[in-house]
Amino acid sequence: MKTRRSLGDMIAVSSPRISLMGSRDRTDTDTARTQEWHRKPAPLERPARRGELVRLRQQFRREATERCDRRSGDRRLRVLAYSLVLSRRARPDEDWNTLQTEAEQRGYAMGARFHDVAVPVTTTCLPGSGAGCGVYTPPWKRPGWGEVERLIRGGFADGVIVLDRHNISSDDDEYRAVIKELGERYQAFIHLVIPEELSGPT
């Protein structure tokens, strides 16, 4: 005589049990080794990546200086000032003073000043997703930065001066994309008051 079995009973019998703790034949040593392997690359790769970013930024500055010297020996490099403030109540005046002083010391002619209010990114960054992992909205989505790019694209400036890289982006891929966009497409450069290796994330 056949007995009726519930759907739950059939699933329990026919489905293999899946352990959330992992396979039984994996040892604690294997788990520790795997965790260590996943942890290792980040700290080892970061200094090399930062070095690449510094070299790339300095390369475009050298090229801009050489172009300026070829055109006219007495013309100074023209830079725009940019700042990212943390709230609508914050004023970038202190940043402007610092950027103006740095521009004068470097022999730049500082032009228009632009700033944006930092808008925190609320999405989750997944490793390997290809999405940016910056703390704030990417620069190309900010109106002030858009004006910086528009003037550089129009030939009104040779570059932009900012306090540190985090005013542009804390994410290496976003930051590198901005350096390359300005340098390769518009022959412009980014000048940082605080170099990459000395500045911490905001």
Image (cartoon, rainbow, N blue to C red):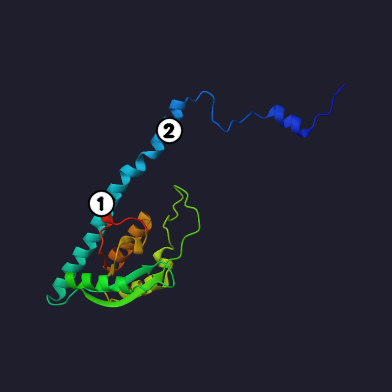
Residue at (24%, 76%) from the top-left corner? Answer: 110
Q: Which residue does the numbered mark 1 point to in the structure image? A: 51
- Horizontal relation, residue 57 to residue 7: left or right: left
- Horizontal relation, residue 21 to residue 142: left or right: right
Q: Which residue does the numbered mark 2 point to in the structure image? A: 34
Residue at (35%, 64%) from the top-left corner? Answer: 167
Q: Alpha-carbon neighbours of circle 2 within 10 Å: few (<14), some, or many (≥20)?
A: few
Name the spot of residue 83 as percent of width and height, x first: 34, 69
- The residue at the far top in this view is 1
Q: Is residue 97 above or below residue 63?
A: below
Q: Is residue 21 visible?
A: yes
* On-image quarter of the C terminus: bottom left
What amino acid is labelled 1 in the image? Gly
Q: Is residue 112 above or below residue 3?
A: below
Q: Is residue 201 above or below residue 30?
A: below
- Viewer-side residue, 152 vs 23: 23
Name the spot of residue 84 as percent of width and height, x first: 37, 68
Q: Quadrant of residue 190?
A: bottom left
Q: Is residue 169 above or below residue 107?
A: above
Residue at (32%, 47%) from the top-left corner? Answer: 46
Say whether disc 1 or disc 2 marks the residue closer to the N-terminus. 2
What amino acid is labelled 2 in the image? Thr
Q: Quadrant of residue 100?
A: bottom left
* On-image quarter of the N terminus: top right
Secondary structure beneath label 1:
helix
Name the spot of residue 37 as percent of width and height, x first: 39, 35
- Viewer-side residue, 88 vs 159: 88
